[in-house]
Structure formats: structure tokens, C-alpha cells
Amino acid sequence: MSKIFAANWKLFKTPDETRTYLSKFITNSNLFIKNEIVFFPTAICIEAVSNCLKASAIKWGAQNSCAKNEGAFTGENSAATVKSLGGSYILIGHSERRAIFNESDELLAQKVEAVQALGLTPMFCIGETLQEREAGSTESILKKQLEMGLSKVDKLKPLVVAYEPVWAIGTGKVATAAQVAETHTWVRELLNKMDLKTTPILYGGSVKPENAAELLAQANVSGFLVGGASLDVESFLKICTH
Ligand code: PGA
């Protein structure tokens, strides 16, 4: 079955570095023809990505967007602009947006609604902190994030969910295969109850070429959202060929 492999470049890469990376990546794209690949560059590199990927089937999107398409919102970027440049996705609710930029569940719900209204696909991130996992509240946290963040979702339009335990992001501390299987199965059941039966669930958090096969083999894992390992073209290519 086709998988989704998404690269979250966070605040890395200049436009020149982006072009060099993507030209090498595209040269090897025959290796993963069956999978959907998505790049999330910084907003400043979006035009470089759009130009590089114009003639390919590789998709791209923005790491964040304003809930409004235009207006007096200094420093923001709009999903409408992403659409005008040929983007397909917007990452919404990454744990760094939630924790560092204080994005609330209510704001994220507005973003999901705005992105879907434009015909783009939200890649909606959820995940618990280490403290929350150790306190046994993983399920209640994920339930709140999903029910509130997706309160305005259009169930008939495309949506992707990415489960990223916060303690596994950028730490090298990957969730065990058993933890991934258990949590993904629980999220699948909740999404089914929410009438989102076909929504793919990606795993994210210290995914590397070395652990990709084992994690991908777990129940209800439809692909990955990759940070650090996606910055190196060779290592992301290895992940995408699964
Ligand atoms: P990581 O990041 O792969 O570097 O852990 C994942 C993410 O933040 O999306």
C-alpha cells in the first residue's frame, strides 16, 4: 500500500541548499514512485521548492499558516499563497508551534478549517510530553488534541494526522515498536469513532533509516513525518524507498 513520507525541515536550509538537495532527490525519484513524498521547507524557501518540484509528482507544503488568508497580520504567511504556488499541504499543530508559539487547540481548529476550505490538506500533529506519558495521561491528551483541534474539520475533505510523542522529537529517543503500535491503534479507533475512518496516521519522532522498517511494520502506521533525518538527502531517500 502507498505510504506518506513527509520531511519537516524546521528552520534549516537556504534556497541554494534547497535546490541542491532537491535536484539530487528528484534524480532518485524512480526509487519511491509508489509513495507520496511531501516537503515542508521554511516559508522563505517555498518558492525554491515550488520551482524545483513543478514538473514532479513530489508534493510540498508550509510548516504553518495564518488562520486568515490576508489582512493586517505582520510576520504571518497564508495558506492561500501556498496554494497559489502549487503547494498541497499545511502542517498544523506541530508540538513546537504548540509549546514555543503557544498555539491553542481553538486556534488550530480554525487553521484546519481554513486550510481545508482552500482545498489544501492539513497534516495535523498530536503528541504527549514525557511527563504526560509517565502520568498515564497519553490517551486523554491525544483525545483532547484530536477532538478540539478537529472540531471544525470537514470529514469529506482530505486530512492526515501525525502522531509525534514530544519526548521523541529531536531527542534520538524513538518510541518503541510496541508503543507506536499501541498508540496508533488507539488513535485509529478514536478517528474511526469521529467518522474519520480513512485518515492516514503518520508517526514522527527520531525516525531514521535504521528504525524505519520496524516502525512502518506496526499496525496503523501509514508513513512518517521526519525532522532531523530528512535534512540529509541520502538518509531521507533511504526512508522514502520503504
Ligand atoms: P525528528 O523531528 O525526526 O528530528 O525527531 C520530527 C518532527 O519534529 O516532525
Image: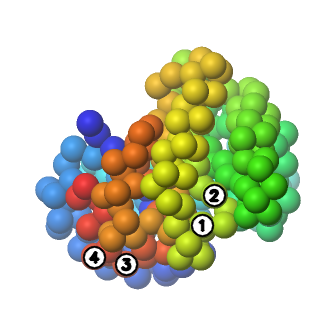
Question: Mark 1 falls on what kind of element?
Answer: helix
Residue 90 percent across, percent down from the top left: 57, 48
Q: Position of residue 138 (x, y in %)?
A: 73, 48
**Residue designated by label 4:** 234
The residue drawn where x is 56% and y is 72% is: 173
Q: Which mark is residue 168?
A: 1
Dots 1, 2 in contact, CB < 8 A:
yes
Cβ at disc 1 under 8 Å from ligand 1:
yes
Tell whether label 3 touches label 4 (CB within 8 Å).
yes
Front of the two marks 1 and 3: 1
Residue at x-position 79% and y-position 47%: 137
Mark 2 is surrounded, within 10 Å at the Cα level, by few (under 14), some (14 to 19) or many (20 or more) other residues, namely many
> What residue is disc 3 on?
232
Q: Quadrant of residue 103?
A: bottom right
Front position in the image: 134 or 24: 134
Q: Which residue is mark 2?
A: 165
**What amino acid is at disc 2?**
Pro
Q: Secondary structure at mark 4?
A: helix
Q: Earlier in the sequence, mark 2 or mark 3?
A: 2
Q: Is residue 11 visible?
A: yes
SS under mark 3: loop
Query: Which amino acid is tagged 1?
Result: Ala
Please name whichever residue, 102 or 86, is drawn nearer the observer in this view of the structure.
102
- Within 10 Å of disc 1 (Cα), the crowding (few <14, some 14-19, many 20+) is some
Q: CA distance from mark 2 to mark 3?
A: 22 Å
Q: CA distance from mark 1 to mark 2?
A: 5 Å
